[in-house]
Image: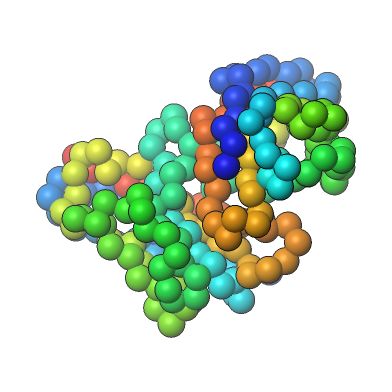
Amino acid sequence: EAGVAQSPRYKIIEKRQSVAFWCNPISGHATLYWYQQILGQGPKLLIQFQNNGVVDDSQLPKDRFSAERLKGVDSTLKIQPAKLEDSAVYLCASSPTGGLTYEQYFGPGTRLTVT
Amino acid sequence: DAKTTQPPSMDCAEGRAANLPCNHSTISGNEYVYWYRQIHSQGPQYIIHGLKNNETNEMASLIITEDRKSSTLILPHATLRDTAVYYCIVYGRDTGRRALTFGSGTRLQVQP
C-alpha cells in the first residue's frame, strides 16, 4: 500500500514570496490533515478535511494560509505572503473513515525555510 | 482531550528495554492513550493505543495503570533505529474530532 506522498520535500523562499505544497493521501482515506511542525515542537494541526469539506480550520492563519482538497483526494496548502516564522515542516496525514484504530498516516513532510 | 506529561529526554542501551512514561491524570473514561513516534526527518508513525487493558503488538507494549492516570510504553529490545521522539497522546474517539494534539514528546536516544 502506497503511503502519503508530499512534494516538494524542501523549499527555500524569501519572505513575502508565495509557496504551495502538495499532498496525495492514501487511496480511499476520506480524512486529510495538514500539520505545521516548528523545530523542537510537536506537530500542530492547521486544517482538517473530510472528503472535500473543511472540518476544522480554527488554527489556520487565514490571512496568509489557504488550503483546498481537490475532488476529495489531493490537497494543496498555500502560503501567501510568507513570513520568517512560517519556517517549519509541513506534514500531511490521512486516515480512513471509521475503522477500529483511528490511526493517522503521515507523509514525510515538506521542510520550508523562509529567509 | 486530556493533557499529557512526558520527560523531555531519555537514554537507553541497545538491546535493553526502553520504558517511556507518560502522565495523563485528567484522562476521562472515553479517552484512549495513543503513542506515536517520529524518527528524524520523517513524519510521525503510529505505534500502539489502549483504553484500560495492557496492549502488545509487534512494535511495543503499552501498560496502563489501573486508575488510568499514567501509562508506560515499552520497547522490549531497543535498537539504534528506535532513536526517535515518542509522543503520548490522549484522544477521545467519540468526540468526532480526528486530529491529534501533540505535545513535545520524549526524545529517546538508544546508545550502542
Q: Is B89 on the left-hand or right-hand side of A92?
A: right
Residue A68, compared with residue B78, is above or below; it is: below
Residue B61 drawn at (x, y percent): 83, 37
Q: Position of residue A79 (x, y in %)?
A: 24, 56
**Quarter-of-image position of residue A19:** bottom left
| Residue at the left extreme, as displayed | A16
Q: Tell me if residue B35 comes above or below residue A92 in the rendering.
A: above
On the image, the x and y values in percent for residue B74 come to 80, 30
Position of the C terminus of chain A, as image quadrant, is top left
Residue at the spot x=42%, y=59% of the render?
A: A56
> Residue drawn 55% across and 57% down?
B97
Report the residue at 67% width, 35% height from top: B27
**Residue A10 at x, y = what percent?**
36, 50
Residue A12 versus residue B98: which sits nearer the camera? B98
Q: Quadrant of the N terminus of chain A?
A: bottom right
Number of labelled discs? 0
Q: Which is more toward the observer, B11 or A60?
A: A60
> Is B106 drawn above or below residue A111 in the view shown?
above
Type of colouring: rainbow
Answer left or right for A46 relative to B92. left
Q: Does residue A104 appear in this view?
A: yes
Q: What is the residue that sits farthest to the bottom in this orientation?
A: A71
Q: Is residue A90 visible?
A: no
Instruction: Please indicate whether residue B41 sits to the left or right of residue A17 in the image.
Output: right
- From the viewer's side, name the closer residue of B57 and B96: B96
The residue sitting at 61% across, 24% down in the picture is B6
